Image (cartoon, grey):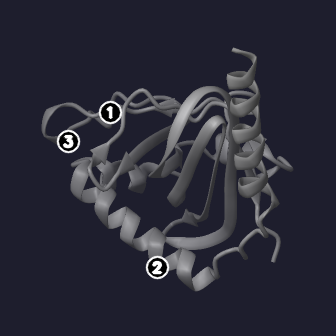
Amino acid sequence: MLSINRKTLLFVLSLAFVLFATPSVEAASKTEINAKVKSTLITFYSQVKSGRELANKASAILVFPEVFKAGFVVGGEYGEGAMLEHGKTTGYYNTAAASVGFQLGAQMKSQIIMFMTRDALRSFKSSEGWKAGVDGSVALITVGVGGNIDSNTVKDPIIGFIFSNKGLMYNLTFEGSKITRIKN
């Protein structure tokens, strides 16, 4: 049994070296991020019937078109996106999170966070690195049959959606994600 544990440990250490010792890729360009944000919003509006109405009520929308998550015992996720206020890009951000526990595999998802009040947006912008669940709570919105939500019942100051090209994703959370402004 001891040899199996050593083999497993060696495999985990080797995988960690490959994942974390490889050079990091450069951040996406603003043009690339803007194009992906636009495409993500089109997908979101097609999947959530009242999504556009909610977006119009929001003080700002933070869109992460591609958040990659991968893990083998230790996992992490990372994505880059843009903040939109009244349809205009006002900043670029990244989101990152780490986790430990039973996990194996990889996935890509999109995230949209809507700041429904000016106070929530002001609090987010004044932070040096905003952590979901610590600096502010993001209410994850679930969608009923036909992609409908009642936008009049959404009263939380910050709401979020997690989805993929296959539709909205459930049993996921924003908790533990740290969002940081990308310096120009």
Instruction: Say what amino acid the circle numbered 2 marks.
Output: Ala
Q: CA distance from mark 3 to mark 2?
A: 24 Å
Location of residue 169 by image quarter? top left
| Image position of 16 (left or right of 64) | right
Residue 94: % across, % down: 69, 58
Up-down relation of residue 95 to residue 4 (above or below): below
Question: Which residue corresponds to mark 3?
Answer: 147
Assign a secondary structure to mark 3.
Answer: helix
- What amino acid is at disc 1? Asn
Going 86% across and 50% down the picture, which residue do you hit?
128
Corner quadrant of residue 27: bottom right
Res. 61 in view: no
- The residue wearing badge 2 is 35
Label 1 residue SS: loop
Q: Residue furthest right?
A: 128
Check residue 152 in the rendering and tell me which mark sits there, or answer none. 1
